[in-house]
Amino acid sequence: MSRPIPTPIVAASVPPRLLMIEASIPVGSPEQLLLLLGISDQHLRRVRESTDAKIAARRGKIHLSGPESAVLSATAIFEQMRAVVNREGSLDQAGVEAIIGQVLGKSPESSGLPVEAGPLGQAIRPRTTGQGAYIEAIRNHDLVFCVGPAGTGKTYLAVATAIEALKTKQMQKIVLVRPAVEAGESLGYLPGDLLSKINPYLRPLLDALGEMMDYDQVKRYMADDVIEVVPLAYMRGRTLNNAFIIMDEAQNTTVAQMKMFLTRMGANSKVVVSGDTSQVDLPSHTRSGLTDAMARLKQVDGCSLVELTKADIVRHRLVEAIVRAYEEGSGR
């Protein structure tokens, strides 16, 4: 009589139990702790949202607990944040977002070589892949067009690469240009000298410059004509050799103005043209010179077109939400 063959018993797979760990990070002073946690603990909340670690601050330490991977990621983020605070004495929301992206692999640190233009020789690093591509385009092409929404670093990175080129003696001069459409390109009736007249229109460029160079050096370079700030209307008839020329808010140029500007380019010069095509202040039915030039020159050798997106916004994290809301027509 044959014996029945026993049915093999297969053990049910049991998911591995998560390893829970704890860690603590000592903080040097109450001031440093405040910088790490952010106003109203906004930095702490952002790290908690990104890693799912439990985080609390007690007795001069940041305490972390939870799954091993979450705690290790949060610890790495706070360590980098602390290094920035120790080095620079401040930490804004954009800096926190950049660190989170680097640690979690969402914004590769290797997205472009750093720009040697920061104060005291500090390097300025691209915070997104798009920004890294923008820097590489500027370094490798004589004419670069860059479009993108507010907060993507279009102006800041252009100024940084210009200062780097000046410091390394690749260029002898920086020229900062912006169309003054709010004044109808007619500045004569405004009070004061030329610099005081154009100051409101060139303020973003000057702000970027001031973050990378000390005030006395900027003033000295401007007095020696090494750095020149000029409204677009004053570019007519000039030829600029050995110059790094930046035009900001280029969406507010007409086709004729853009042609005039681009043909100022002289020997061994580099031109960067940036703008936001969603914020055109030209009269209705007037074609933007930026849009027109990009369409005409996209196949020209030596010219590069870079488009930054919402993913490249590095200002306050609400800026991306604001841009998206306006693009989607919210509130209509």
Image (tube, helix red, strand yellow):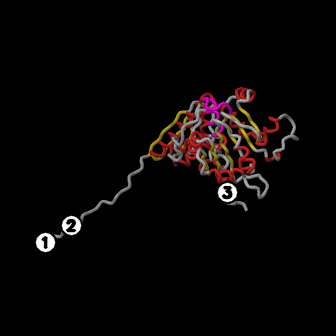
The amino acid marked with disc number 1 is Ser
In the foreground, 6 or 134: 134
Q: Which mark is residue 325?
A: 3
Q: Earlier in the sequence, mark 3 or mark 2?
A: 2
Which region of the structure is painted magenta?
157-173
Mark 2 lies on residue? 6
Can residue 31 be seen by looking at this rendering? no
| Location of residue 329 by image quarter | bottom right
Q: Residue furthest left?
A: 1
Query: Residue 184: x percent and y percent?
Result: 82, 47
Quadrant location of the C terminus? bottom right
Q: Does residue 223 lie above or below 100 as drawn?
A: above
Q: Amino acid at mark 3?
A: Ala
| Cα distance in 3D space between marks 1 and 2 | 12 Å
In the picture, which quadrant includes the N terminus?
Answer: bottom left
> From mark 3 to mark 1, how far is it between C-alphas?
76 Å
- Residue at left offset 65%, top offset 52%: 296
Q: Residues within 10 Å of mark 1 (few under 14, many from 20)?
A: few
Q: Position of residue 62 (x, y in %)?
A: 54, 38
Seen from the viewer's position, the closer of residues 286 and 323 is 286
**Which label's residue is closer to the chain start, 3 or 1?**
1
Of tags 3 and 1, the one toward the viewer is 3
- Could you give the CA–CA distance between mark 3 and mark 2, rounded to whole angstroms? 65 Å
